[in-house]
Amino acid sequence: MYVIVVYDVGEKRVGKMLKLCRQYLCWIQNSVFEGALSEAKLRELKLKIKGIIDPSEDSIIIFTNKIGYNMDKQILGKERMSTDNFL
């Protein structure tokens, strides 16, 4: 499935979230990652995220889309990192 993760976490946890998300997904821009993950890998990522965040302060949004359904992507301005290999 295709996954987009957007996070807003406290200063103390930013480095850990960045490192974790880079292990699973492709960095797009500040606090935004995307890529293809299996359902098992997505569950694993969610568990690791829960171990890092403070639920009373931090916000994580995970968008998922089963590969096979159409999803258009438009970039306005400069593309920070190509994700063609994920689509």
Image (cartoon, rainbow, N blue to C red):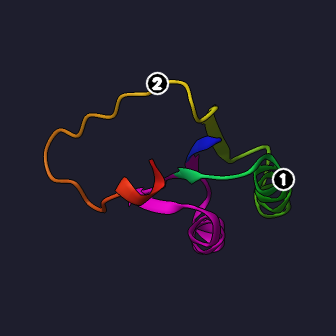
The kind of residue tagged 1 is Ala
Numbered tag placed on residue 40 in the rendering: 1
Query: Can you tell which quarter of the image residue 73 is in?
Result: top left
Q: Looking at the picture, how far across and down is residue 51, in whole percent?
A: 85, 62
Q: Residue furthest top?
A: 70
Which comes before the other along the chain, label 1 or label 2? Answer: 1
The segment highlighted magenta reads: 6-34
In screen coordinates, is 58 left or right of 3?
right
Left or right of 83, for residue 45? right
Furthest-left residue in this view: 77
Q: Is 24 in the magenta?
A: yes
- Relative vertical location of residue 51 with respect to residue 60 in this rendering, above or below: below
Q: Tell me the crowding category of disc 2: few under 14, some 14 to 19, or many 20 or more residues within 10 angstroms, Cα based.
A: few
Image coords of residue 69 (percent x, y): 54, 24
* Residue 27 to residue 69: above or below: below
Could you tell me which residue is drawn at 17 percent across and 38 percent down? Answer: 76
The residue under label 2 is 70
